[in-house]
Amino acid sequence: MCNSTSSVFDLVVKSYSRLSLIDKALSIVHLAQAHGFMPGVLSYNAVLDATIRSKRNISFAENVFKEMSESQVSPNVFTYNILIRGFCFAGNIDVALTLFDKMETKGCLPNVVTYNTLIDGYCKLRKIDDGFELLRSMALKGLEPNLISYNVVINGLCREGRMKEVSFVLTEMNGRGYSLDEVTYNTLIKGYCKEGNFHQALVMHAEMLRHGLSPSVITYTSLIHSMCKAGNMNRAMEFLDQMRVRGLCPNERTYTTLVDGFSQKGYMNEAYRVLREMNDNGFSPSVVTYNALINGHCVTGKMEDAIAVLEDMKEKGLSPDVVSYSTVLSGFCRSYDVDEALRVKREMVEKGIKPDTITYSSLIQGFCEQRRTKEACDLYEEMLRVGLPPDEFTYTALINAYCMEGDLEKALQLHNEMVEKGVLPDVVTYSVLINGLNKQSRTREAKRLLLKLFYEESVPSDVTYHTLIENCSNIEFKSVVSLIKGFCMKGMMTEADQVFESMLGKNHKPDGTAYNIMIHGHCRAGDIRKAYTLYKEMVKSGFLLHTVTVIALVKALHKEGKVNELNSVIEHVLRSCELSEAEQAKVLVEINHREGNMDVVLDVLAEMAKDGFLPNGIS
């Protein structure tokens, strides 16, 4: 009987929806319908949007959409976009794609928002290649990707650590006339930090500031984390000061990162100072924060203080987790108090916390170091009984123990067992076995062992290095590089060259890591000609020298009096360093290099490396 229109009810429904009063909004729709009014697509879109924003069960949104269809209200592109967003958020990309197909059959054309939502959905499910394909298909529909499209793809690539592909996306963005915004820079900095490429992260940060854009708290936390990881706590604190100057408040993760950074270095006074500031600013330390402190005390060998932190956690109502106990246990093992470590293991089991592989590996290594091999083996058997897979650290500790006892047959048996189980030996494992064989004058056997995985047919085909080189995934590639590193560490450069050349023979291009190891190895072995040849190949392939390799190569070239080659390397290194903050250091390098003060040049390069100013070719 009231003198009104459906649009008035649409407005009321929209207002309730904005306040997330979803049930009330829906009751207004039903009230209007009961009195002969027909709330339109605006009302239903508002209810659907509020449902998705409030993270209500997606089935509720499905029921609203069904009711909408039964009420003869035609959905528009906004309706579909809201639903697709909801299903992508719920991780159900298949239903989202079904809606995507349905909207086209209903004559409702998808827009850029539709595509961006689906691309983001793919990226969150780590299906970045499917996201890329969707991005490319936009052109077929006459749509051009926008800045958000590219930011979504860049975020997906950064999450997966595919930073080399990011540069291609940035080139395409530039070609389309898009400038990087705060989201792009923040994502890139976080991605480079995660990869361990601190130099490129710092370049991005400097470029961002030059363009008048503001890094976020997350960005600064990533930079702080990178500096902590590099052990450069002064630089980490500089970033904290920059945050404050920009009016940004550190969060719980920022403080925990700094506590961990100082603790790793054993600077416990500084760690507790950060903890006090954290408390003063209203943040309660988490289990992760306390674990960092426990680790710091273990690093400095102050086990009583580590136990005190564990007790403090309990008093504050926090339950120590497997990391808390394993860290304390590992600390006791490092302090050669394995019996106390066993007590900690019993306590954690009593508390209902299951020991993990790290717990057992730490104990096994502790017993092995004290020549209590039988007890170590008992723990190994217990580990297998409870279904925990031994890792390379477990095997290496036991192999080392048997080598020390002179039982090389048992050591070799364990080596074969780890290979059969797909646990690839690392450089330490090889070094332990080689040392054991060399001690018994079995030098030829030691050399053959290092070549074993490369030549021997009896090794299961899925773990031979031939197969690894042919089907290189990231994990497997690291194993090939570990083999090269093992040869280089032992000065066996002929064998290292064989593996390296076989990679080329299999048409698999070595990455920067392999080049860095080979150059460093040849520098140590005194073959500067080979090292410089590899350096030129590396630069031509677009890879960056690791800072340690830079210093090794510069030293070797200077020692051999290779002036032209030395000039070329230093010029390239300084050209690769784009940071304005490093200008003073670059000038120092140039002046001292000109004057022949190579000791000063090497000192300055080492300082630049420490501060993250030099490009770093290894992630």
Image (tube, rainbow, N blue to C red):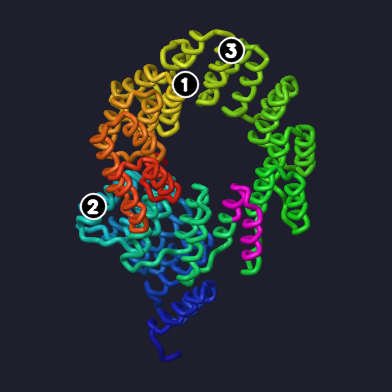
Determine whether the residue tagged by mark 1 lies in a helix, strand or loop: loop
Q: Are marks 2 and 1 in contact (CB under 8 Å)?
A: no
**Amino acid type, label 1:** Lys
The residue closer to the viewer here, 285 or 57, is 285
Classify 191 as above or below 255: above
**To which residue does mark 2 refer?**
172
User: Considering only order in the chain, which callout, 1 or 3, is on the residue closer to the N terminus?
Assistant: 3
Q: Is residue 596 magenta?
A: no
User: Considering only order in the chain, which callout, 3 or 2, is on the residue closer to the N terminus?
Assistant: 2
**To which residue does mark 1 refer?**
490
User: Could you tell me which residue is drawn at 59 percent across and 12 percent down?
Assistant: 439
Whole-angstrom CA distance, mark 2 to mark 3, is 58 Å
**Amino acid type, label 3:** Lys
Classify 190 as above or below 351: below
Boundaries of the magenta span? 259-278
* Quadrant location of the N terminus in the rendered image: bottom left
Could you tell me what secondary structure mostly forms the magenta stretch? helix
